[in-house]
Image (cartoon, coloured by chain):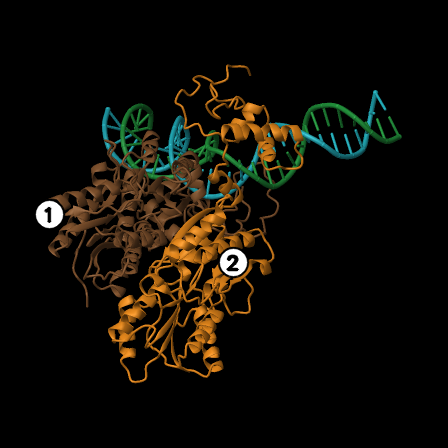
Chain colours: A orange, B brown, C cyan, D green
Amino acid sequence: MSHAHPALTGPDMDEHTPDTPVDEPEAGSDQGRPTLKTIAFMTGLGVTTVSRALKDAPEIGAATRKRVQMIARQIGYRPNRAGVRLRTGKTNVISLILDTEEQVGGFVSDIIYGISEALAKTSYHLIVTPYSRNNDPLEPVRYVVETGSADGIIISRTEPDDKRVRYMIEHGFPFATHGRTDMGINHPSHDFDNYEYAAQAVRKLAALGRRRLTLLAPPSNLSYYHHMRDGFADAVAECGLIEIPMNGVTLDHSIQEVRQKTAQLMRRELRPDGFVSGSGSSTFALVAGTEDAGLELGRDVDIVSKQSSKLLHLLRPKIFAVDENVRLAGFELARSVMGSIAGKDIATLQTLSKPGDALQDKQG
Amino acid sequence: MSHAHPALTGPDMDEHTPDTPVDEPEAGSDQGRPTLKTIAFMTGLGVTTVSRALKDAPEIGAATRKRVQMIARQIGYRPNRAGVRLRTGKTNVISLILDTEEQVGGFVSDIIYGISEALAKTSYHLIVTPYSRNNDPLEPVRYVVETGSADGIIISRTEPDDKRVRYMIEHGFPFATHGRTDMGINHPSHDFDNYEYAAQAVRKLAALGRRRLTLLAPPSNLSYYHHMRDGFADAVAECGLIEIPMNGVTLDHSIQEVRQKTAQLMRRELRPDGFVSGSGSSTFALVAGTEDAGLELGRDVDIVSKQSSKLLHLLRPKIFAVDENVRLAGFELARSVMGSIAGKDIATLQTLSKPGDALQDKQG
DNA sequence: ACTTCAACCTGTAACGTTTCAAAAATAAAA
DNA sequence: TTTTATTTTTGAAACGTTACAGGTTGAAGT
């Protein structure tokens, strides 16, 4: 029972395995990352005690607890994620499921930064699970759920009747959606109030004397299409304006397509004198198309646009831009999933962000 | 030894544990994800054999191998990542270390999409490890290496003498850098040829009759600052032009700052008649600042700019834009790290992407 | 002195995988 | 047949963690 202790380079001391020949003390230095065993050896306690002491279990003496925690901090102990995960099933991972066809515009960066911010002080890591819009959107969700590769999921491009949501609910898997659903189900989510945005946008254009408005909306399968369209339609009616629909083009379409369709539209007899646009990069195309048709911003037409970056004003000061804080969205979404994992009340996990200091004409 | 087999819902059959009382067959259905044990039970083989058969180990009979693989596919077996990770130390994770102060512009989205694409058919997952430019950039690297939370790292904002690179080399940790170093060390990397870009840009401006050029460069601590500056300087000399330096402002500065400094510069007596810009979003600010000073693009000044999105032309067709394919960069970086992990020859893991169909004047 | 009880601590087993050393089965050689 | 290779399969151990079911203590109650 009393051979010389091997040098304290790691948890390589197994004096209680009786049948192992105690010949050479394993000269090859392991990578030497401390484990519970290391601390157990240093303190003379059992691994179980150490494990408990580190997580403030009640049945551990105050002195012991402090001693263990102190040593742990000293030697920089970090729980082995694989160990925890294998034993408990908890991955400490949040999966962000991303559409890789997404148009540019900083949307993805911002949401990731927001999530990162929320995760920073926690034990969670962020993993990005990509999928192509052309494939089944359920596929990546199923993958994560089936393989248990995360504790929670964040999805966007939410639909009113979203099968991913249904799937995750059915499997009791924690998640949060960017955008709301309309399935009679309560679930964690964060959304920007696109109804309010569109309504305010219309009113602004009305106040400028514009009468014939066009909405550049998201694809109609997405939830926020409906919100935005409803807000638009209600305000158009309220202000006694008319809508000039622009068919066959959405925020999902390429810059080139939007530009071209816009130009076509603007060359027609009955053309809009006001635009409401749902995204910054599409607005670029809108402007370009309008100018292709020989029309001038501020004179022939006004545009109200959402933006997640601050670029619009730089080259077209006359655009009325409303900032959507996507970074905040990421933050809230992360908070939501984590809350959902922790079993918090769903009511506290649903947030709606209002269009902020909207519609200031920032022309300089 | 011969009690009825429990229903085939999972690996809950432990007939070889002799001391366990064999009372109830565990009615509670587990989550039922198949493991090696499940397959072992179904095939009547040992777990070891199954494990080997699945990874095409040579010492397994062809018939057995096929049988095992077939069943595995049938029941949708997926190796438990925690198990593998705990046993082998291999995480099957690549960590992308990101500066969360990064300016917008789709850079991050694109690089992530590119990485995802490269990782799609592999067993690797992508994890995003954020840090703030204001903190020590070594910190996240150290975290990943120390906790072994990934098999490889991708970093950007590479410096000529980069302590992160030094650290990872010292620790034998696989990585790839976005941007090259100048430390006399060979390591996996991908870079855009900013020397060539800047030189071509200068020549283009010279050909347009421009004589006094200003470079909007990255911060001087980054590697590609030097490449870009050298390319710029060499071509300026070669063409017999002069440089009007714009001090105190880099691509890292906010849109507002760049705009303001540009306006200041353009109001001076001796102002540039040509700009070379290192990033799309900064170019927006450059244009705005120039126009703030009452000058006109194409008449008073020309701008050549890199861009990673296709937005620049839309609102200022006269800009000469060179596309940097950041998605490709992500793809190459991922390929590089994985190659590095696999121990491939470093020479094959270094790529340099040339400015493509550069400097076409795409005005329409 | 004996039991009882709480407070504190501990070894064992298990999560799913791979590696090790060795056993069984088969084929080849004698 | 027996011996010797060779091929194929195998149980046990280990990675680091936590849950479970017991142990030790020492003090309090009787």
As shown in the figure, which amino acid type bears the numbered disc 2?
Answer: His
Chain bearing mark 1: B
Q: Residue at x 61, y 57 (%)?
A: A345
Total numbered badges shown on the rendered structure:
2
The residue singled out by tag 1 in the image is B239
User: Camera-side residue: A335 or A211?
Assistant: A211
Tell me the SS state at disc 2.
Answer: loop
User: Camera-side residue: A310 or A296?
Assistant: A296
Q: Residue furthest front?
A: B269
As shown in the figure, which amino acid type bears the numbered disc 1?
Answer: Cys
Q: CA distance from mark 2 to mark 1?
A: 67 Å
Q: Residue at x 54, y 41 (%)?
A: B1
Within 10 angstroms of label 1, few (less than 14), some, or many (20 or more) residues?
A: some
What is the x, y in percent for residue A273?
35, 78
Q: Residue at x 43, y 82 (%)?
A: A241
Q: Is residue B237 left or right of residue A249?
A: left
The residue singled out by tag 2 in the image is A171
Residue B300 in sight from this viewpoint: yes
Say if B42 sits above or below A6 in the image. Answer: below
Quarter location, residue B178: top left
Quarter location, residue D24: top right
Quarter location, residue B143: top left
